[in-house]
Image (cartoon, rainbow, N blue to C red):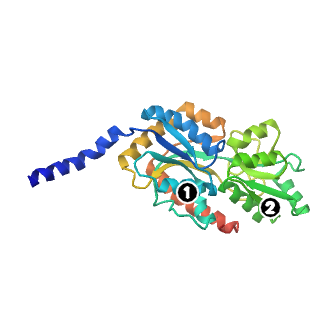
Amino acid sequence: MKKWLLVLAAAAAIYAPSLRAETYPTRPITLVAVFGAGSASDTLCRVIAQPLGVALKQTVIVENRPGADGALAAMYVAKANPDGYTLMMGTNSPLSADPFLLKDVSYDAVKDFAPVTRVGSFTLMLVIHPSIPANSVKELIDYARANPGKLSFASGNTAGIVAGETLKHWAGIDLLHVPYKSTPPALEDILAGRVSMMFADLTTAMPHVKAGTLRALTVTRLKRSSLFPELPTMDEAGVTGFDLDAWAGVVAPARTPPEIVAQLNRELRKIIESPEVKTKLKNVGFEAFSSSPEELGDFIKVQLDKWGKMVADAGIKRR
C-alpha cells in the first residue's frame, strides 16, 4: 500500500505542473498599474490587457495602485499569492529607482518578483510652459541662472525626479522640485502656469506639445526620437552623457509556478510583437519589444546599478 502511495505521489509531482498550466487561468487576472489613470503605465496596461484576456480566455482587469512612486503597487504585488492571478506592469520607478530614493522600501526588486517579459521603453522629453523665454536647454539654463529661485520642475515618477535633479545638479541652477503622484496632474499644473517645467513621457506630454500648449526642448536619450526627430538629445544640447530611458516589464510575485510564467511570457510576446499593438504603442510614444523572463531578470539587475549611480551622481537624498 505504501509503495502505491509513493508511486501516486511521484506521478502527481510529474503531472501537476502540466495540469496546472492546462487549467490556468480559471478566473480573472489583475494587472496592476503602478501609477494613476491617464498615466503612461496605465495606458500601456490597457493596451496590453484586452488582447491578453482574449489569448487567455479570461478577463484581465487593470487596477491602478498609485503612491510612493510605484512602491505601494510593488509592495502589494510582492505580497500577493504567487498563482499567476496578480501581475504588475513594473517600471523603472519601483524596480530600479525607488530602492535608492525611498527609505522604507519593504520589497526586494530582484528576490520578490518573477520576471515575465520586457514590454519596452518610454522616451522622456523636457517640456516647459510657453511663457518661459527659452527655446533650447542652453537658453533655459541661462534664464534659470539669471533668475535664481524663479523656476520649478514637476515630477510624476522617479524618471522625472532623477532627470530634473540631474539637470539641476549638472547646470548648477536653482530649481524647486514639486512632486506629484502621477504625470497627468503634474502636467495640468504646468499647463496652468503653476509649475515651470517637467521631464515627461511622450505618452502623456505629446498631445500638449502638438497642440502648442507646452514647448518641448529635448529628449533624454542618446539617440533622437523617431516621433520628434527635430528635438535634440540632452547630450546634443550640452548636457553630456545624459542617457535616461524609462522602461516597462511585466512581473509576477516570486515563486509563481514557472509553467505559468512561461505561458504568460509566450502569450505576451505574441501580443507585444504584433504589428497592431506595436503601432498603437508607437502612436502614444512608446517603443514596444519583448524578452524572455531571464533577459528581463538580468536587465533589472543592470538597471538597479545604473539608477543607483544616477541617484548618487545627482546628489539626491532618500526621503
Label 1 sits on what residue type?
Leu
Residue at image position (80%, 61%) is: 176
Q: Give percent across and percent down for residue 181.
A: 68, 53
Q: Which mark is residue 215?
A: none
Residue 184 as seen in the image, left or right of residue 64: right
Q: Which mark is residue 176?
A: 2
Q: Residues within 10 Å of mark 1 (few under 14, many from 20)?
A: many
Q: Are marks 1 and 2 in contact (CB under 8 Å)?
A: no
Q: Give percent across and percent down for residue 305.
A: 57, 63
Does residue 291 lie above or below 270 as drawn?
below
Residue 175 as seen in the image, left or right of residue 226: right
Label 2 sits on what residue type?
Leu
Q: Residues within 10 Å of mark 2 (few under 14, many from 20)?
A: some
Q: Give percent across and percent down for residue 87.
A: 48, 47
SS at mark 1?
helix
Most extreme residue toward the left, as rendered? 1
Q: Is residue 38 visible from the viewing direction of this image? A: yes
State which quarter of the image contains the C terminus.
Answer: bottom right
Residue position for label 1? 95
Q: Is residue 228 visible from the viewing direction of this image? A: no
Q: Give percent across and percent down for residue 63.
A: 55, 44
Query: Quadrant location of residue 41?
Result: top right
Q: Earlier in the sequence, mark 1 or mark 2?
A: 1
**Mark 1 and mark 2: Cα distance apart in space:** 26 Å
Camera-nearest residue between 12 and 276: 12
Query: Quadrant location of residue 289?
Result: top right
Residue at image position (53%, 57%) is: 75
SS at mark 2?
strand
Q: How many marks?
A: 2
